[in-house]
């Protein structure tokens, strides 16, 4: 193993491994050090996303959605089933297989791109030196012309409901349940609370979500958030807004939770409690004294718009820096810095990062909400197309939700797109491209969308913005 590289990347998640692969593609010598350790002690590349986030959660969302549809929707198609049963162990085995395949795939990709993949811990020292500690504890000093920090994030703990790993768990714990809890409590009605709450609710758990804020999904367009709250409530997800947890105590096999809402102090009892109140940047042990890399007040590594830290030739990307904690944002930053290091053009468009919540109905958006567009002083026009008017959505037995376009009424430029409904996460791709290309409503209106597809909802929403929708009444 050489001790000196063009680039050393610390962290092998969605920020770090693309940075390493792209640097390899750019013909630079690269090492990527990753310390992710699974519950069984094995090491795996891919970080939170592949091991305990995006991928396992989507595997469980798919399984639980199929189970739910088999129980609730198949009848409408004329399909009858007897004795529908969920085998949680088989579901978890499938998920583990997907995770193993994907993380193994990253190790192969690193190798194929000439990256030296090192499992263990990396620590930045002054002078772009990196101390590498191997799994057996041996240490080695490496050096690089450039260092990329991609150490990610970890769940935020809650003092009043401390994790015990068994009854009070974080999102990773909630992905590993070996049985459906009868009563599941979730603290935080954010992305994780809704996705994992949905998984276990579809499998039969009585799910209660305790959210401290009075508003639901404050980052989303109000019309979309209101529709989502209506749909989740209809599905039986109990979402209590303005609920502040003051204590959680494990008593026997249950967790007793005390919380306060507008009506005063309340008690609730759950078999499992998931704390999902956000994540915090992880930089423990990452920076030795004197590196010059600075953290902000919330613990994020401080960077400029091109992910440069205060130390020359040291970059930081992904969840450990400002911006949304999303795998695709992390990946884009990783690729950007690998290109900048190679002297190529590199840029991340922070105004066109899509958000997706993989519930049913799915939610996805990009750009400005109607409220944000109005607050920015723009004269706004909107177009909304409900999926109940989409032939494809009806055929799919998925008629709830809508696609909404927010545009500048004067210039016609599309400012934001907000979708709640079937395959919203796939449909948003067109909207991201529209924003990337500064498209107008007219551009979307003149783009032919195949029939019958869900994407026609985006087309019709663009038409509706000018009161010229074809497949619904214009209001
Ligand atoms: P991480 O993925 O956290 O990777 C950092 C890596 O660095 C880890 O392997 C860590 O062990 C390693 N590391 C840290 N310090 C060191 C060190 N000193 N030496 C060596 N290695 C080190 N995002 C989406 O876009 N879509 C989703 O659907 C989605 N679903 C999610 C579901 C859940 C349940 C969770 C928890 C998150 C989800 N996310 C999702 C968020 C996504 O996982 C993160 O945004 C993404 O993983 C960030 O990538 P990263 O590389 O910055 O950090
Ligand atoms: P989040 O920020 O999405 O939601 C946390 C929620 O908890 C918020 O609604 C917040 O108001 C609430 N909260 C905070 N403190 C509380 C308290 N003491 N009591 C009750 N509620 C409280 O965070 P998350 O759901 O933990 O997810 C973490 C990160 O992971 C997010 O930034 C998200 O982007 C990412 N993630 C993304 C996806 C996806 O892209 N589909 C899926 C899962 C996670």
Image (spheres, helix red, strand yellow):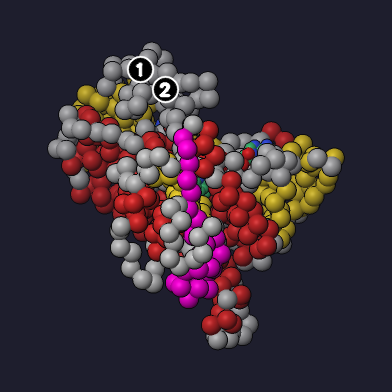
**Viewer-closest of 51 and 216:** 216
Q: Is the residue 310 above or below the residue 363 in the image?
A: above
Q: Is the residue 297 above or below the residue 208 in the image?
A: above
**As drawn, is 124 to the left or to the right of 379?**
left
Q: Mark 1 near ligand 1 (CB under 8 Å)?
A: no
Position of the C terminus by quadrant = bottom right
**Image coordinates for residue 134, horizontal then vertical, percent:** 36, 35
Q: Residue furthest left?
A: 27
Q: Are marks 2 and 1 in contact (CB under 8 Å)?
A: yes
The magenta-colored residue range is: 378-402
Distance between the alpha carbons at the discs numbered 2 and 1? 7 Å
**As drawn, is 379 to the left or to the right of 81?**
left
**Secondary element at image label 2:** loop
Label 2: how many Cα within 10 Å (few below 14, some 14–19, many 20+): some
**As drawn, is 236 to the left or to the right of 91?**
right
Residue 425 visible (yes or no): no
Q: Which residue is mark 2?
A: 302
Q: Kindly identify the residue that appears in the image at 71 percent across and 55 percent down.
A: 238
Q: Residue furthest top?
A: 290
**Viewer-closest of 126 and 42:** 126
Residue 456 visible (yes or no): yes
Q: Quarter of the picture for ligand 2?
A: top right
Position of the N terminus by quadrant = top left
Q: Which residue is mark 1?
A: 310
Q: Kindly identify the residue that appears in the image at 48 percent across and 41 percent down.
A: 380
Q: Earlier in the sequence, mark 2 or mark 1?
A: 2
**Secondary element at image label 1:** loop
Q: Kindly identify the residue that appears in the image at 25 percent across and 46 percent down.
A: 110
């Amino acid at each position: 193993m050489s001790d000196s590289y063009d680039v050393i990347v610390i962290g092998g998640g969605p920020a770090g491994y693309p940075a390493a692969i792209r640097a390899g593609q750019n013909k630079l010598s690269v090492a990527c050090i990753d310390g992710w350790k699974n519950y069984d002690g094995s090491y795996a590349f891919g970080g939170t996303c592949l091991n305990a986030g995006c991928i396992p959660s989507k595997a469980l969302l798919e399984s639980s959605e199929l189970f739910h549809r088999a129980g609730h929707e198949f009848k409408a198609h004329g399909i009858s089933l007897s004795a529908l049963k969920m085998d949680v162990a088989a579901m978890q085995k499938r998920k583990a297989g997907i995770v193993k395949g994907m993380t193994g795939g990253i190790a192969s990709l690193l190798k194929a791109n000439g990256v030296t993949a090192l499992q263990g811990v990396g620590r930045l020292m002054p002078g772009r030196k990196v101390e590498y500690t191997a799994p057996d504890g041996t240490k080695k000093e490496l050096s690089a012309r450039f260092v990329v920090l991609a150490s990610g994030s970890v769940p935020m703990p809650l003092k009043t409901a401390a994790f015990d790993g068994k009854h009070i768990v974080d999102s990773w714990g909630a992905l590993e349940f070996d049985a459906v809890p009868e009563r599941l409590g979730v603290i935080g009605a954010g992305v994780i609370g809704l996705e994992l709450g949905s998984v276990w609710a579809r499998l039969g758990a009585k799910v209660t979500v305790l959210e401290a804020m009075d508003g639901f999904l404050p980052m989303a367009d109000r019309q979309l958030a209101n529709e989502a709250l209506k749909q989740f409530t209809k599905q039986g997800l109990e979402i209590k807004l303005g609920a502040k947890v003051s204590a959680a105590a494990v008593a026997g096999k249950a967790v007793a939770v005390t919380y306060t809402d507008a009506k005063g102090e309340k008690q609730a009892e759950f078999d499992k409690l998931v704390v999902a109140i956000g994540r915090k940047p992880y930089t423990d042990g990452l920076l030795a004294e004197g590196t010059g890399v600075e953290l902000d007040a919330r613990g994020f590594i401080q960077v400029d718009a091109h992910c440069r830290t205060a130390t020359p030739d040291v970059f930081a990307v992904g969840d450990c820096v400002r911006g949304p904690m999303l795998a695709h944002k992390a990946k884009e930053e990783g690729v950007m810095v690998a290109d900048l290091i190679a002297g190529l053009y590199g840029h991340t468009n922070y105004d066109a990062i899509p958000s997706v919540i993989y519930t049913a109905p799915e939610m996805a958006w990009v750009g400005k909400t109607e409220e944000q567009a109005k607050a920015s002083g723009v004269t706004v026009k909107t177009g909304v197309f409900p999926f109940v008017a989409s032939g494809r959505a009806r055929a799919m037995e998925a008629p709830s939700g809508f696609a909404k376009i927010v545009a500048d009424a004067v210039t016609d430029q599309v400012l934001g797109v907000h979708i709640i409904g079937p395959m919203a996460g796939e449909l948003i791709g067109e909207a991201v491209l529209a924003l990337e290309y500064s498209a107008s409503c007219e551009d979307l209106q003149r783009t032919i969308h195949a029939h019958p597809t869900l994407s026609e909802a985006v087309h019709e929403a663009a038409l509706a913005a000018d009161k010229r929708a074809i497949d619904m009444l214009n209001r």
